[in-house]
Image: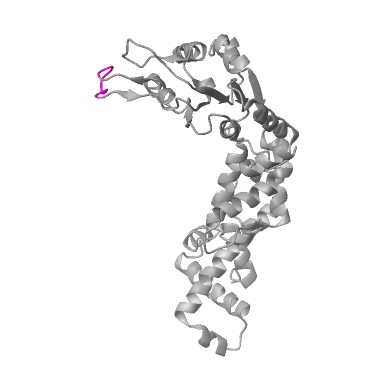
Amino acid sequence: MDKIQSIKQRFEIIGNDTQLNRAIGKAIRVSSTDISVLVTGESGVGKESIPRIIHQLSLRKHGKFIAVNCGAIPEGTIDSELFGHEKGAFTGADKKAIGRLSEADGGTVFLDEIGDMPLDMQVKLLRVLQERVITPVGANISSSVDIRILSATHRDLDEEIREGRFRSDLFFRLNVVPLHVPPLRERIDEVPEFIDLFGREYAREDHPALRFDKDLLKLFEDYDWPGNIRELSNMVHRLSVLYPGELINLARVDTGMLPSGMVELIDPELLSSSELNQDATAEVNEVEDIIMQAQGYAQFRDQGKGLKEMLSDIEEDIIEKALEDVNGNVSRCAKLLSMQRTTLIERIKKYGLNDG
């Protein structure tokens, strides 16, 4: 277990989930061999960390680690991308190119999203695994290559085989040692640790990491994170940019910045309160700007009113004038003042502007 904890610290892997620890433990044990490993797990769980651990602990660690996303290579170019090509092999091939497999000679190739590889490429990859030779596009001669192939997928390859989209013989070659990385929803108690890690990673140089209050943190823990760690990382990055160094709560956060599935978990009354607070904050900020520009601090201080009372007076005057400009049309007035209609109605009632 000490070895596993040491590896997690080295590769900045968070949590103490049993499935994750088991996968890392197996990765450590197989690293000294050239056995094929297939890592499974949903998109965004961090599957790529397992092949990197295996490579860094192996005898190939001084060789290259080449990662190829099979699902991101345009159809029709994966052959050339993996195996290389000869000059003139196809239109646009004005010079010879070395493929990613040859580039990794002496090292490790990580084929991410192997389940997205076209069937014709699966046949060629199978030959590489069986014979350790490659044939570039347009070449008549094959050459040997010394590589270890690790792979990963978010797909159910048993189902892909049944549907005829993946070769069973290739699956058996790749899946000698299967490792599984669990989704974030099965490691939900680790969400605060990830928030802390990503908060520090995305903090601006002149600000500390943002912090969550307990209610917002609870909301993040209740959400099931279909995009897993990648989705959580993106969310913390977004909030770090919008609220740098702040202690944020639901009233402070624009719910439009949250996933719809997370917003659905918020209590309707709390959500309404949050939206009203956001409107009020925006309005107060706007009025404060007007005060500072039109009157200056000294002038409104000398009138003997507190800031809250002064802001109310100014807000009442602005709403009254805006209503006059639109002949009392509340919807047009709300649009003019960039307010929600319901919020404006509350203000009109508050100041008695609908009397007479």
x, y percentage for residue 169? 56, 9
Residue 302 sits above or below residue 185 on the image: below
Instruction: State whether residue 12 appears in this view.
Output: no
User: Which secondary structure is most common in the magenta stretch?
Assistant: loop
Residue 108 sits above or below residue 189 on the image: above
x, y percentage for residue 320? 52, 71
For the point 56% across and 90% down, the residue is: 302
Residue 251, by quadrant, is bottom right
In front of the other: 150 or 146: 146
In front of the other: 301 or 140: 140
Query: Is 140 on the left or on the right of 308, as rendered?
Result: left
Query: Is 70 on the left or on the right of 136, as rendered?
Result: right
x, y percentage for residue 201? 57, 52
Residue 92 on the magenta span:
yes
Instruction: State whether residue 9 appears in this view.
Output: yes
In front of the other: 116 or 352: 116
Query: Is 152 on the left or on the right of 181, as rendered?
Result: left
- Image quadrant containing the C terminus: bottom right
Residue 81, by quadrant, is top left
For the point 57% across and 25% down, the residue is: 153
- Image quadrant containing the N terminus: top right
Residue 170 sits above or below residue 116 on the image: above
For the point 62% across and 72% down, the residue is: 351
Magenta residues?
Answer: 88-94
